[in-house]
Each structure stands twice: as C-alpha cells, then as structure tokens.
Image (tube, rainbow, N blue to C red):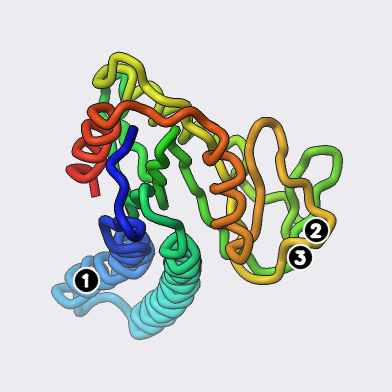
Amino acid sequence: MAKETDTVIIHGQPGSRARFRGVMRASLPLCAALVLCGYAIGVLLPLPAVGLVWKGLMIVVLAFALVLATSLTSQRIDAFFKGAAGEVAAAWALARLPGGYTVFHGVDIADAHGGIKTHDFDHVVLAPGGLVVVETKNWRGAITFDDGVVRTGGIVPSADPVAQVAAEAEALSSWLADRIPDKPEVTPLLCFVGDSLPADAPTELRGVAICSDAALTDAILSRCSKALPMPASAYERISTLLKGKV
C-alpha cells in the first residue's frame, strides 16, 4: 500500500497554466489589430496622393479595430483568470485531504496515442486506492441539470463539462496503461466552485462525480476510501510520473 504521511502531499501551482495560457491566447486579437495598424500605416505613408477622406476613413476603421480587439482581449483574460481563481479555490479544498493522498496541480501530458495533442488536467489526486481527475468550473449563473444536460444561467456551454472530464480521465488512464502494468482506476470528478450548484444537484452524471468545492474533499474520500490499497511500488511509480508533468 502507499506510504503513509501525516498530511497530504502537494505538487504544482494551481491556476498557473490557466493564467499563462489565458494571457497568451487572449492577446491574439490585440496583436492582430496592432499588426494590421502597422501594415496600414506603412501603406498610407508613402502615398501622399491618397485623399484625406480615405486616410481619415482608414484611421477610423483602425481605431474601431483597436477598440474591439482591446475589448475582446479584456473579456478573454477575465474569463481565463476567473478559471484560474476556481482552480485555486479547489486547491484549498484538496489541501484538506488526509495523509496518504498526493495532489498534483496543472498536470500536462502528451496524448497516449501519439501526435502533438496534449491533455491539461486542473488537478489529479493520487489516493491510496486509485486516482481522481478533477475538472473545476468557476461559472457565473446558477447551474442546472435538465435531462442530463448541464446549463449555466439557462445556457448550454459550448463544451459539455461532463464529457470533458470523462475524456480527461480516459486520457490519463491510457497514458498510465503504457507505463504501469496494473494501473489503478481513474475516477472523473467535476467540481463547481462557489454557490452556483443547487442543493438538489446530482452527485453523479454519466459516470462522472459532481460536487461543489465545499464538498470536494468528502466526495473524493467517499469514493476512494472503499477501494483496495495499491502496492507501495505502484503508488510511488505513479507519483514520480505525475510529478514530472506539473
């Protein structure tokens, strides 16, 4: 079985990847607008024959493009930082896990089937008897579940979060299968941060555990405490593998 410790072991910084990638991706509209402005200015300056009307129109168009790009950049950065804040909130909850558990924040692994695709997990919990992949959602608006469909503020998100975390658990399971002879079970868990999750929300949907950040520790313990403990060698091997991916 896993080596016992007095407290949970934690690796990685929650939300760091989300903040970095968010700034990089969100800045694309503004960078594109700046490149367009530079190109337009370079075209206009050597052409004195261009009338003042056309030059004025071009300036108005460029100003509008800059304002729009700045607005889009601000909105996207806010969204990514809100997601990072959700990961931090979940990390505080995971820090309350007991000894014998190890938490990895921001795990990034390559696709088990090759190619350039990678998988980025918010949190991976290594329990004495298995693994839990935790996907956090810090959404605005009340969360509802209608006929198995998750909605936030009455709107269906562009990506199904239940299918997302289920795919993440499968990806981690496949990645470990190439490295661990007898890989443990990987449980997908969807964590909603804040008070947006209703009291009558299901605790499981399509094989995915669902909870709020306040109930995150109990949700993990209730699912992992009943599992048979894995050999210490397997626990240490998985810990070493995941530690190298944060």
What residue is disc 2 on?
Answer: 154
Mark nearer the N terminus (1 vs 2): 1
Lateral position of residue 57 relative to residue 200, left or right: left
x and y, in percent, of residue 127 in the image: 42, 41
- Kind of residue indicated by mark 2: Gly
Q: Residue at x 54, y 57 (%)?
A: 217
Q: Gap between marks 1 and 2, in whole Å? A: 42 Å
Mark nearer the N terminus (2 vs 3): 3
Tag 1, which secondary structure? Answer: helix
| Disc number for residue 229 | none
What residue is disc 3 on?
Answer: 142
- Kind of residue indicated by mark 3: Ala
Q: Nearer the viewer, residue 148 or 246?
A: 246
Mark nearer the N terminus (1 vs 3): 1
Cβ–Cβ under 8 Å for marks 2 and 3: no
Q: Nearer the viewer, residue 54 or 156?
A: 156
Q: Residue at x 35, y 63 (%)?
A: 14
x and y, in percent, of residue 9 in the image: 30, 56
| Disc number for residue 38 | 1
Q: Nearer the viewer, residue 17 or 189?
A: 189
